[in-house]
Image (spheres, rainbow, N blue to C red):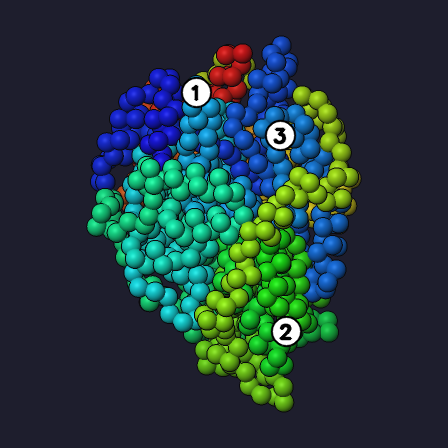
Amino acid sequence: IVLESVLRNCDGKKVTEQHVKQLAGWKPRAARTAEIPFVVARVVLQDFTGVPLLADLAAMRNVASGMGKDPKTIEPLVPVDLVVDHSVMIDHFGTGKALDLNMKLEFSRNKERYQFMKWGMNAFDTFGVVPPGFGIVHQVNLEYLARGVHHKASGKHNVFYPDTLVGTDSHTTMINGIGVVGWGVGGIEAEAGMLGQPVYFLTPDVIGVELTGSLREGVTATDLVLSITEMLRKEKVVGKFVEFCGEGTRTLALPDRATIANMAPEYGATMGFFPVDEKTIEYFVGTGRSNDEIAAFEAYFKAQELFGVSDAKSMEFTKLLKLDLGTVAPSLAGPKRPQDRIEIGQVKETFADLFSKPTSENGFNQAAAKLNQDFSAGKSTIRNGDVLIAAITSCTNTSNPGVLLAAGLLAKKAVEAGLTVPKHIKTSLAPGSRVVTEYLEKAGLLAYLEKLGFNVAAYGCTTCIGNAGDLTPEINEAITKNDLICAAVLSGNRNFEARIHPNLKANFLASPPLVVAYAIAGNVTKDLMTEPVGHGKGGKAIYLGDIWPSSDEVHRLMKHAMNPKVFRENYAQVKSNPGKLWEKVKGVKGQVYDWPTSTYIAKPPFFDDFGMQASDQTSAISGARALGLFGDSITTDHISPAGSIKESSPAGQWLLANGVAKADFNSYGSRRGNHEVMMRGTFANVRIKNLMIPAKPDGSRLEGGITVHQPSGETLSIYDAAMRYIAEQTPTVIFGGEEYGTGSSRDWAAKGTQLLGVKAVVARSFERIHRSNLVGMGVLPLQFKGSDSWQSLGIQGDERFDLEIPTKLKPQQDIVLVVHRQDGSSSKVTLLSRIDTAIEVDYFLHGGILSYVLRDLLSAA
């Protein structure tokens, strides 16, 4: 499919005959040095990443207009769909009014953002918006936006070609479940793609995963994807394509395939690809695609001999892995990373073990005797391990009728047995599509979920991205006052530190039925395999096996989930009936945005000094200071949080100074259209640990975005220290460990880093999207070689650093780091430049991809 795109778009300039030959000659175990220029058919956005992208495009038009060029020079050349799904928060829950109240709050908070989106719809010809309240971008993409194949006129003929895309969300890979090639990129790379620039990447390794056997009774697709995530993360598949094959793959229902493809970012792969076969066609029929679309889709893939799931022996892979589906067990993942899978019978023991382990061993550093103590929280009593948030959420699972019907059936059995959920637990149901509510109602299950507090509270990402809303003041006070380790259980895909809620330190990913079960149980220190979930009518002990639905029970209700008429009627309303709240939003007119005063939307500064000639980016970096020393698995949530804004943080103080009340702060994610907030929020995660700060006597570390300014020795916020270094004309660098930048595709993790004056990030390894984003913003990603690390070099943070950058940059060349220590000694270490391709060299020399593309467009205008 990628080869077809390269061949079809071969123009002798950006895509050459040599590119075609290189890709056609792919060898399973060859060195990966050739870059592929991939021209996609469309681009999909979510609103947290889409709004700053739109702001960049608007600023580009300002530059074009200021230079006397036609602003329409800046115009997407492929269809662009923005799905508004990241803004809604769970402020109200557990009532039939929750959905309506949360949507009204969403529109009240985000009015300026939505007005800006409507300007984009008016100003750009191919820019469309799916309004709030329809669902989550990846489920909407799967059920509605994806067409299978596209066609356009070419002379007297129609040319048909496969659907391909990039999206500004890492879980864009969900679309791989229906055989569509696509993956997540940062907003800056997506901008280039929509403005006619190919998406470049190194020719990848392809890892085959042969699935055999079948899932056992009681095992869900969620359990399967958590097992695959654990297996593939250990295999280090970052930057590689993963393709599923074998008899076990053929038996998987399409929603199960989509669930597995969705979590490709968690296992590190660029894609988790499933070929098109009969199950794909059945899904297109069930979701209401037209007969003509379905016929073209099937005919195209059969004509190209791409139809059907292959046996492993008929394929050439860089490496083949095998998984027997019969070995998969019911599991959760956590408490801090999605790849840390725990079988359900070991959750109690694992939590108790981590509770008293030191932080250096990923534990919580608590006294073991404290585990079973009770603490007052207003009218409630809470303990360590208590589940305080239970959320059925996220595209990963709410797109899958099997696990949602299972959750409804479990709720039905639980209610009939007399089980309840403790009142202090924040419960919510946030489907990724309105179709979900329809089939849960028709199956007679929604009422039972509601009786346990799982009322529909929103159609959006909610808890999974940190929009869980707050807990009660009494519970927050009890947690912080007593340093409690309480939990969230959610059917999401990410559980990084401080992502779900800043005060909940233990966060577990689970299937929707297990979310309901743990809400009833109320505490993760209860072994659900041997202890009662709760006590029902007459005090009878009710065990998980008593209420767990059988696969036959789930299967009998699946007929409600795939009704073509329901899908067609629902998505027709995107244009015909987008909702009164959306219709009331008025966007400004005009081809050039005039940037009214706003704390949500501001003109980005990336083009302030723009000229047609690029400034020199190859001068040596000398006398730099370390802004931060970080350990392994620093996520983009650590670097650029999306959740709540603390009043005492630099961003909170800026909002207060600009007349925004604390109650109106909203979230970092919603304010990504304003660089003043976002640069202050960079490295502001409340759980990030800058290891430059000395450890406490008990071995624990201060948390939050703080650093030590040198040479003054003052402890400052990272933002304040960065601004002082900029004023002193002192460059800065960041040091990290393994998997630096894992997680979401958010480009603000790179944009914020650049605006803080950071010239280079030096780490043991990088996650794919964040490395690309750093290059795209003109920040140099450098990788330690072999066993080298900042720890092995004895770096403490009070040193000065030089980087010897060659005047002629090449992909993946050696760059020397010189470390100057306080005692006057110095040492050198050779680093690997992670500017991986020739086009990335050009991007870096232009100060980033946006400046490169803008110069290219304006020079041709």
The residue lying toward the viewer, choosing from 427 and 349, is 427
Q: Which mark is residue 156?
A: 1
Q: Element at badge 2? A: loop
Image coords of residue 545 (percent x, y): 48, 79
Q: What's the residue at 63%, 48% (across, down)?
A: 569
Q: Quadrant of residue 123?
A: top right
Q: Is residue 396 left or right of residue 818?
A: right
* 254 vs 449: above or below: above
Classify residue 54 as left or right of residue 225. right
Q: Residues within 10 Å of mark 2 (few under 14, many from 20)?
A: many
Q: Where in the figure is residue 681, as x and y percent of width and height?
A: 60, 42
How many other residues sit within 10 Å of disc 3, few (<14), some (14-19) or many (≥20)? many
* Mark 1, secondary structure of its residue: loop
Q: Are marks 3 and 1 in contact (CB under 8 Å)?
A: no
What is the spatial separation of the Cα atoms under label 3 and label 2, in whole angstroms?
Answer: 44 Å
Q: Quadrant of the C terminus?
A: top right
Q: Position of residue 508 (x, y in %)?
A: 51, 63
Circles 3, 2 touching at the beta carbon (< 8 Å): no
Q: Which residue is mark 2?
A: 421
Q: Which residue was labeled with disc 3? A: 55
Cα separation between marks 2 and 1: 65 Å
N-term mark: 2 or 1: 1
Q: Earlier in the sequence, mark 3 or mark 1?
A: 3
